[in-house]
Image (spheres, rainbow, N blue to C red):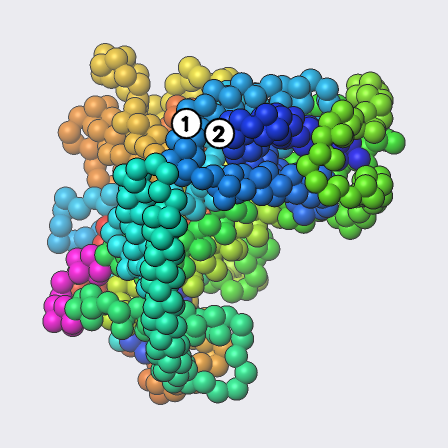
Amino acid sequence: MAAGGAGGNSGKTYSFKVVLLGEGCVGKTSLVLRYCENKFNDKHITTLQASFLTKKLNITGKRVNLAIWDTAGQERFHALGPIYYRDSNGAILVYDITDEDSFQKVKNWVKELRKMLGNEICLCIVGNKVDLDKDRHVSVEEAESYSESVGAKHYHTSAKLNKGIEELFLDLCKRMMETAQAEERLKGNGASQSASSRRGVQIVDDEPQATPAGGCCSSG
Amino acid sequence: MASAADCGGKPLQNAMKMAKVAIQLDGGSKHKEAYCEYLRTINYISHALLEEAAPQQEREVVVVVVEVERMLRLAEQCLERAKSFIEKSADPLDLSAAASCSPAQSEPHQTTDLPVATAADTGTSPTKTGHRRSVSDGGGEPPPFLPPDVFQKLQTEESHDTSKKELTPIEQASRLNQKLKANYEARLARLPPGQANQKTSLKLSLQRQMMENLIIAKARQDALQRKMEERRLRLQEEANRRFSASGAMTAEEQEQRSLYTNVLEYEQDHDWPKLWKANMEGNPEDVTLVSRLVSYLLSRSDHPVVKLLRKHQYRVYNRLYPIVSKGRSRALLLRPAPPPETQRRSLSTVSFSTGLASPPSRDFHADSDEEGEEPHTQASVDRENSFEDLEQFLTQLDWTPPDGSAEDAVSESEPTCDPSTLSEVQGQEMRALKEHLKATVKDIHIAIDQLLSLCLLSFECLNTSSSKDLCLASIEEAFFTPLWSALLTLFRKVNMEREQAFETSMTLYQDASPGDIGVPLKLFPQEPDALQGSYPYESAVQELKLLLNDCCPQKKLECIVRTLRVICACAEDYRCLHEGDSAHRTAAIGADDLLPILSYVALRSQCPQLLSECAALEEFIHEGYLIGEEGYCLTSLQSALAYVESLHSAAAPPPEDKLG
């Protein structure tokens, strides 16, 4: 296991921790399973199933190891929330578009995350179950304007139809890489820096759907 | 002053009694017995002083310094007398007979004498430090933790058999001389009686031979030393080059450099490092080689890495011992605190009895300073009568502690105190314990960093990221294994309240079903038939309990990961029971299901100390594992334990949550 959080040297492997937050019924488990599912192995089940998943990616020639931490949505486990989000690079906050209450919960988590981790963490607010759009109770405008106001990005997904999930994760990874690179620049490690800035942050789309080799799932 | 009388008075009196017996025997020309009795006195004194000195604070040693001085002088005089027997003794056989009889004699003597002494001690003074108490308690049951010096000895002995030390020239000579002496004695014994002339000539020739041997050895030793010195200088330069000596060095850099010099020196004397290095270069693909090399390295007790390891272990254990060995001092602390006028003294007693390096506050410090002042002047009155010889000690045999009455006053007024001062003392003690814990954890991190870097300096081939991890794992295992139980004891003291809360929940929810803890019905079988006499998730509970048996953080983490995997596998099985074989894969276990199950498993494990184990693991888990599966599992277990801990205050498990 590579030591350290984000970064490394010119061979560069980024290791990112992403926490998954959301109430019990919003479908975060299905979402993350969909993402990490191995399309070439039907029988694939990870050892910790959907609670902890890892995924290796290759984005613009850089290796990225994602560790996705599921958290319990139940109120009674929230006291220990902070030890889950500690050192996270990103957070995915999931709500159910048919459940106004689950959106309110997302707002609470955003407040807590910003309080605990400041602006270092990349936030994604995800309205899941867009296949049930006819029962929508959270308006698109409200969700998007709220997300913008807190510096988060908003996505619409459907775990059932496998819609919007790849985009969500790919986007998040790119943002986390940018944050990590900005941090490196601030620290000013000269030698490795010149190489990475020459390549630039111009991100060529990995086309994850077409190249499953880049997105293979490893059992954590 | 109470402690002065307490700590010094009784052992001194006992020692004096023993010495008196010896002197009486001496006077009665019973040389053998007198010799044994002197030795016994010395033995008793050194035992008593060792008990006093080892775990205590310097400050208190100052308080009883007069007593210590007296005891030491008494021992010195006994030693002088004992030596005089050997010099006087015309017939060495006689003496050796006396010496050989002494252990058999002294054994029953000691067992009758010492407990009596300590029993008398406990009887008279109720305000003693926790330390004295533990000494007298120690008679019956073996103490749970070894004193640091014994610990160190065991540690070094453990690896001793692997390396035989070469004797220095002086040691060789002294062996030779011992043989010569034995020959001489044998010859002397064969000599017919009355041949004084022969005897002297034999003795003279022995002395001459022995002297010659020593002189030769000394010369060889000096030459060897010069050579070693030269080599050391040469290697030091090599080390300096390696570290590109430039500018100012920090103390750590300097230390590292000298350690590296030791490594170079070692490599001059031993071939195996070279062979291993060549082997590593020859087989870069062989991953087992790294672990094998490191474990071989750790088995060489004379290698600088291992020496450094032992040094750090000893240091950490030394830090832990005064606290963890005082399990019984809790009883002392839980007693009602003395009223305000005596409170100061008891505060300082508390801090000493826990053996903390730093009193928690400045005021606290000042108080104990004042306290120290008083007995000192008191005692210095006694010091005026400087005793020149043994006889003078004996005149003081009936000397009693001058402040015995003050002690009584304290004990009488003790029960009349308010509990608020008690909690204040406890709060202070807890703060000090936490500080101590923090400092110990920091020491351990520094020690392990230093060990790893010395290891990598010694074997550059290990300096790749994967080898480094393996190397670190081996070092940690060697480092933590002998220390863990002491370390955990400290963590448990700090987390005592949490563990108690956990225990309360444990008793309250003894018979709870998984459903009571919030596990969804589909994830455990309701019919008892399906379980065949056990309970749901029993295999996970068994796995979790194994954690207590491991002694190194890495292994414990692996155990937690296995526990969570077993939970997932069990949950999968139980769901299949409900839904038949056609369970859809999308309905896998997420954290919403995992945490209630894990809480149930933690509850059934009935191990409150898991809280402390996890607190310790959190300190010692590697950064690299922190965001991985190990980190996730540890975090989940901590979360579950905290939930169980809070269960008893929540009266009933909250059923209001929506369960996925």
The disc label shown at residue B32, or none:
2
Percent of width and height locating residue B536: 30, 22
Q: How many marks?
A: 2
Residue B647, can we see it? Answer: no
Percent of width and height locating residue B553: 38, 46
User: Against B561, is B167 above or below?
Assistant: below
**Residue type for callout 2:** Lys
Tell which tag, 2 or 1, sits nearer the viewer: 2
User: Against B127, is B640 above or below?
Assistant: below
Percent of width and height locating residue A119: 55, 64
Residue B192, can we see it? Answer: yes
- Please state which of residues B56 and B69 is positioned toward the viewer in this rendering: B69
Place residue B589 in its image quadrant: top left
* Left or right of residue B177: residue B608: right
Place residue B122 in its image quadrant: top right
- Please state which of residues B187 and A27 is positioned toward the viewer in this rendering: B187
- Please state which of residues A218 and B409 is positioned toward the viewer in this rendering: B409
- Please state which of residues B77 and B7 is positioned toward the viewer in this rendering: B77
Q: Subunit of mark 2?
A: B
Magenta stretch: helix, strand or loop mostly: helix
Q: Which residues are magenta?
A: B277-293
Whole-angstrom CA distance, mark 2 to mark 1, is: 9 Å
User: Against A83, is B9 above or below?
Assistant: above
**Residue type for callout 1:** Cys
Q: Secondary structure at mark 1?
A: helix
Q: Is residue B282 magenta?
A: yes
The disc label shown at residue B101, or none:
1
Label 2: how many Cα within 10 Å (few below 14, some 14–19, many 20+): many
Label 1: how many Cα within 10 Å (few below 14, some 14–19, many 20+): some
Q: Secondary structure at mark 2?
A: helix
Q: Subunit of mark 1?
A: B
Q: Residue at x 23, y 23 (%)?
A: B578
